[in-house]
Structure formats: structure tokens, C-alpha cells
Image (cartoon, rainbow, N blue to C red):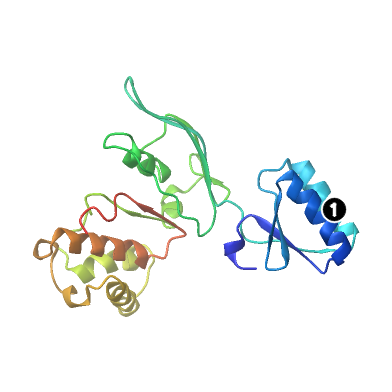
């Protein structure tokens, strides 16, 4: 099953009479969605034992259960951040599913950038937890630099290296962090520049680009590393 199914299981090969009865019961309980003839059963918010019992009942009835990759791969619980006496983040809870887009909207100074910076520990939360792919980001045993390789970020101020060309900005992390050879790194960079419409700027320096062009280079640089999670801090502010 594709990741678009998110936190669902698909039950197949069901007798139609039982399927109708099961569907009615699940619809009544708010736990079932029917789509394209398949039963999509969300167990993300169910009690663990309750979920196991339901699945075991279905298996005992000779139903085939297809699990998906759609478990939440980014979870925050009671995330708080204070600067002195100023409490900026006041207990943030949410889960992000694979291929899910989450938009954080708020006025200037409301903590949007602080929240994003907490996600990859550029800012250390005052309280709460951040779980990425079942790894506690704040655990002493976690290799934070390794985890950051799977979390891309486009900064509000772009943070391009002024002494490097557009190509150099994109390939630096590919060569130094991902350990790709120069030829492969260049090929990936060229592909990313094509996607953001800046292939003709490959040999230019950041000072020779407009704000919008610099922003697109920053997006291409983050995409080049193929992270599992992308954090965008006002990614279209200069476009």
C-alpha cells in the first residue's frame, strides 16, 4: 500500500454481508472510512490493547490485514520554550504523518520560527518531547547530527555561503555530509536547480542573485539531501 493511506489498515477479501455489518459498526463509532471498495480503518487514536483486540478479531475471521508505513514519523508532546520569563511555546502537541503537509500560521513574533528550530534542536526546548522515526531527539544517546541529516530546513534568512557559487552551496553538504563524489553531487545539484528554475545561475554567487533567487537556491540545497522531513521557515516570503 502506498504511504498516502497514512495511519490506516486495509481489510481485504471480506464477505460482503459481513463487510456491510462491519462497516456500519465502524462508521457508527467514527473509526472507519470507506474508499474505492476498501475498508480503511484508522487505529492511530485507539487504545493499544483495543487496537490489538480488533486486529486479532479480524485475523481470526480469516481477513487479511495489510499494514502500512503510515505511522506518525514526527511527534511532539507538550513542547514548551521560554526565553527568560517570556514563554513562547506553551505546550505544543501534534503528529505529522508521511507525506502530510502542516502549515503553521500566526503573526510576527508568535513563535513560528522558534517552533521549527526546536524540531531539529537548533533551539533546545524548555520542556516536552520530540520523536522522529521513533527516536527521542533529546535523548543523550541520540546522535543529533545523524538525525539532522533526515530533517531538511530552509531558513528565513537563506543562510547561503557568500564565497561559494550556487553549485557550491548545493553540493557542499552532499560531498561533506553525504560523502558523495563531486560528479554525483554536481548531477544532483543540477537536477535540483532545474526544478527551481535556476539552472542558468549555476556559476553565480549569492550576491549576484535577487532575494527570490537566493530563496530558491536554499530550497534546492535542502531538497538535494532528500530528507524525510522538510522544515520551511516562510519559504515564499521573497518569491
User: 10 Å neighbourhood of mark 1: few (<14), some, or many (≥20)?
Assistant: some
- Picture quarter with the N terminus: bottom right
**Residue drawn at (36%, 65%) of the image:** 223
The answer to whether 76 is drawn above or below residue 34 in the figure is above
Point out the residue furthest to the left here: 208
Q: Quadrant of residue 59?
A: bottom right
Q: Can residue 141 be seen here? A: no
Asked which quadrant contains residue 106, the reply is: top left
Name the residue tied to disc 1. 56
Total residue callouts: 1
Residue 117, above or below 160: above
- Percent from the top left, x then y, of residue 111? 33, 35
Write the residue at 28% across / 69% down. Answer: 171
User: In the image shown, does 6 or 201 lie closer to the viewer?
Assistant: 6
Q: Residue at x 66, y 43 (%)?
A: 45
Viewer-closest of 90 and 26: 26
- Looking at the picture, how far across and down is residue 8, in whole percent? 67, 57
Q: Residue furthest right?
A: 61
SS for callout 1: helix
63 sits to left or right of 40:
right
In the figure, residue 217 lies in which quadrant? bottom left
State the residue in front, 26 or 147: 26
Whether residue 209 appears in this view of the structure is yes
Please state, as top left, top right, bottom left or bottom right, where the C terminus lies in the image: bottom left
Residue 140 drawn above or below residue 179 = above
Q: Going 79% across and 52% down the picture, which residue do you hit? A: 24
What x and y, as percent, mark residue 210?
13, 62
Residue 185, image x and y in percent? 32, 74
Tell which of 157 and 33 is nearer to you. Answer: 33
> As drawn, is 175 to the left or to the right of 210?
right
Amino acid at each position: 500500500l502506498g504511504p498516502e493511506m497514512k495511519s490506516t489498515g486495509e481489510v481485504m477479501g471480506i464477505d460482503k454481508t459481513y463487510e456491510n455489518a462491519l462497516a456500519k459498526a465502524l462508521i457508527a463509532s467514527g473509526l472507519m472510512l470507506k474508499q474505492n471498495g476498501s475498508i480503511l480503518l484508522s487505529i492511530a487514536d485507539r487504545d493499544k490493547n483495543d487496537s490489538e483486540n480488533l486486529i486479532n478479531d479480524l485475523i481470526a475471521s480469516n481477513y487479511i490485514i495489510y499494514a502500512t508505513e503510515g505511522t506518525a514519523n514526527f511527534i511532539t508532546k507538550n513542547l514548551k520554550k521560554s526565553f527568560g520569563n517570556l514563554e513562547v511555546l506553551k505546550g505544543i502537541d501534534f503528529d505529522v504523518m508521511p507525506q502530510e503537509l502542516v502549515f503553521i500560521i500566526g503573526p510576527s513574533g508568535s513563535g513560528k520560527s522558534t517552533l521549527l528550530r526546536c524540531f531539529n534542536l537548533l533551539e533546545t526546548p524548555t520542556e516536552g518531547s520530540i520523536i522522529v522515526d521513533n527516536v527521542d531527539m533529546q535523548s543523550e544517546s541520540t546522535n543529533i547530527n545523524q538525525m539532522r541529516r533526515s530533517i531538511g530546513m530552509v531558513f528565513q534568512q537563506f543562510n547561503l555561503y557568500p564565497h561559494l557559487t550556487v553549485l557550491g552551496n548545493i553540493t557542499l553538504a552532499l560531498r561533506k555530509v553525504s560523502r558523495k563524489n563531486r560528479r554525483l553531487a554536481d548531477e544532483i545539484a543540477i537536477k535540483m536547480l532545474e526544478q527551481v528554475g535556476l539552472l542558468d545561475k549555476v556559476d553565480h554567487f549569492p550576491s549576484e542573485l535577487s532575494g527570490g533567487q537566493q530563496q530558491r537556491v536554499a530550497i534546492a540545497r535542502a531538497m538535494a539531501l532528500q530528507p524525510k522531513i522538510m522544515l520551511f521557515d516562510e519559504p515564499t516570503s521573497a518569491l
